[in-house]
Image (cartoon, rainbow, N blue to C red):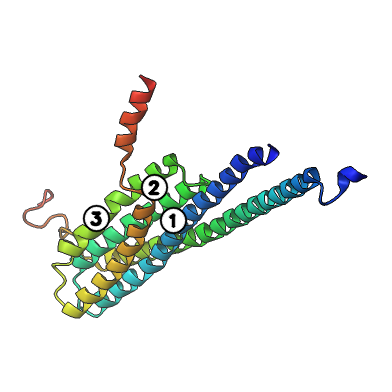
């Protein structure tokens, strides 16, 4: 009988470990993203200094990178606030990552169109793809649900 | 004394429960360790982002320093200026 009482406790503890593993994966993916961003900056500034990338194009890439940096920091702050990846954490992180993925996709599809040097464009595109892969890992864990969707659920629950 | 015999079903049940409790404590400790590791990862992540943002700010400042003024400043008194 007592064993039956312990079973839910053990199940809960295992669930806790599972959730913290997901949180760890999000933190690791965000860390990987933070390691890619300086490489994109270095490639951009080097190409600009070498005259292979105009100031205007360098500023376009800079603006995307700054957006990712701020969002990554925000995701880091949100991750710190949780000890497990519960639905609230997923919504908060998804709300940060989803628009960021769209911004990176936009940069990959059209934002680099102005980069005249094909080697520079390919290098930066490759690095942005690495950043995108890290963001995709986070999105795969937290899902694509928006805060708005959950707001509707919250309203329905309160009603 | 017979109640503490290892082969007594009650004792076996107690041992099983103690093992379960031990496993639970280990799980909690592992979780705590994992959380600490996550904090270290997040600290490093923030450091990377902050360094990148600072480097971009430096790049922007270096570009602004070499930019010519948007409109040339005419000395007062030249034709086309208010003091002429």
Q: Residues within 10 Å of mark 1 (few under 14, many from 20)?
A: many
The numbered mark, 2 or 3, whose residue comes first in the sequence reads: 2
**Left of B30 or right of it: where is A123?**
left
From this viewpoint, which residue is outermost toward the left?
B79
Q: Residue at x 23, y 67 (%)?
A: A58
Q: Position of residue A95 (x, y in %)?
A: 33, 45
Pinpoint the chain carrying mark 3.
Answer: A
**Residue A80, how many percent across, how many down?**
51, 49
Residue under numbered circle 3:
A103
Residue B69 seen anywhere in this rendered image of the structure: no
- Give the CA distance from mark 2 to mark 1: 9 Å
Residue under label 2, please give it.
Answer: A93
The reply, left or right, for residue B41 in relation to residue A87 is right
> Height in image: A127 above or below A106?
below
Look at the numbered discs 2 and 3 and tell me whether their residues touch, using CB distance below 8 Å: no
Q: Which residue is mark 1?
A: A26
The disc, 2 or 1, on the residue closer to the chain's N-terminal end is: 1
Tell me the residue at 36%/52% (across/down).
A71
Q: How far apart are the alpha carbons under marks 1 and 3?
A: 19 Å
């Amino acid at each position: 009988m007592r064993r039956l009482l312990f079973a839910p406790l053990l199940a809960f503890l295992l669930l806790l470990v599972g959730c913290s593993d997901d949180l760890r994966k999000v933190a690791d993916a965000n860390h990987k993203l933070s390691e890619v961003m300086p490489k994109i900056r270095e490639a951009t500034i080097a190409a600009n200094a070498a005259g292979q990338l105009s100031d205007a194009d360098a500023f376009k890439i800079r603006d995307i990178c700054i957006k990712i940096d701020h969002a990554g920091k925000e995701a880091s702050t949100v991750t710190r606030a949780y000890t497990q990846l519960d639905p609230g954490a997923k919504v908060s992180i998804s709300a940060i990552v989803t628009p960021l993925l769209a911004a990176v996709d936009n940069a990959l599809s059209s934002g680099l169109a102005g980069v005249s040097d094909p080697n520079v464009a390919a290098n930066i595109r490759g690095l942005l793809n690495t950043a995108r892969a890290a963001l995709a890992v986070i999105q795969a864990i937290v899902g694509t649900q928006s805060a708005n969707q959950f707001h509707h659920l919250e309203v329905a629950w309160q009603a | 004394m017979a109640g503490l015999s290892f082969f007594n079903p009650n004792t076996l049940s107690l041992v099983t429960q103690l093992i379960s409790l031990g496993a639970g404590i280990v799980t909690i400790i592992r979780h705590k360790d994992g959380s600490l590791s996550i904090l270290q990862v997040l600290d490093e992540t923030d450091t990377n982002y902050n360094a990148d943002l600072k480097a971009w700010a430096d790049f922007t400042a270096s570009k602004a320093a070499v930019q010519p003024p948007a409109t040339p400043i005419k000395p007062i008194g030249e034709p086309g200026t208010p003091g002429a």
